[in-house]
Amino acid sequence: MTTPSIDTFGMQRSLRQCLANMAALLYRQGHVLETVTVPHRGLDPSALETLKSDSREWSVCQRILESSEAATWNDQRRFVLTGMGRELLFDMFGEGAADCA
């Protein structure tokens, strides 16, 4: 078994911080976590612009989420978490926090 590198720990910490910030921002905007955890939903460009204008950190977090492949764009061109992003979010907050059933 290999030990994860410091870069892996740093990336996970950045992802976790971005996911936590994202969750807080979504709640403040009246969204629920299912907005980004259900693949056919997602944040439209207008919602993303509102998040960006309300938080200086949003643009950086969005870039980190996309570059780490924790988030992507669905077929409707909405911002959603990937399977890996959802798994990490559920690990942090519990699956009941964003029940996709």
Image: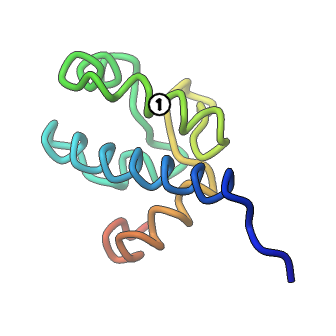
Q: Nearer the viewer, residue 61 or 71?
A: 61
Residue at image location 39% in from the left, 50% down from the top:
17
**Colouring method of the image:** rainbow
Q: Nearer the viewer, residue 82 or 21?
A: 21
The percent coordinates of residue 55 (x first, y second) are 23, 26
Quarter of the picture holding the N terminus: bottom right
Residue type marked 1? Gln
Task: Give the SS element for disc 1.
Answer: helix
Quarter of the picture holding the C terminus: bottom left
Q: Nearer the viewer, residue 75 or 63?
A: 63
- Residue reaching furthest bottom? 1
Residue 73 drawn above or below residue 9: above
Q: Give the side of residue 66 with respect to residue 59, left or right.
A: right
The percent coordinates of residue 20 (x first, y second) are 33, 53
Q: Residues within 10 Å of mark 1 (few under 14, many from 20)?
A: many
Question: Where is mark 1, residue-wise?
Answer: 62
Residue at image location 84% in from the left, 76% down from the top:
2
Residue at image location 29% in from the left, 50% down from the top:
23
Residue 90 drawn above or below residue 68: below
Residue at image location 16% in from the left, 36% down from the top:
29
- Residue reaching furthest right? 1
The percent coordinates of residue 61 (x first, y second) are 43, 34
- Residue reaching furthest front? 6
Q: Give the side of residue 93 with respect to residue 60, left or right.
A: left
| Quadrant of the image occupied by residue 44 | top left
Q: How many marks?
A: 1
The percent coordinates of residue 81 (x first, y second) are 53, 47
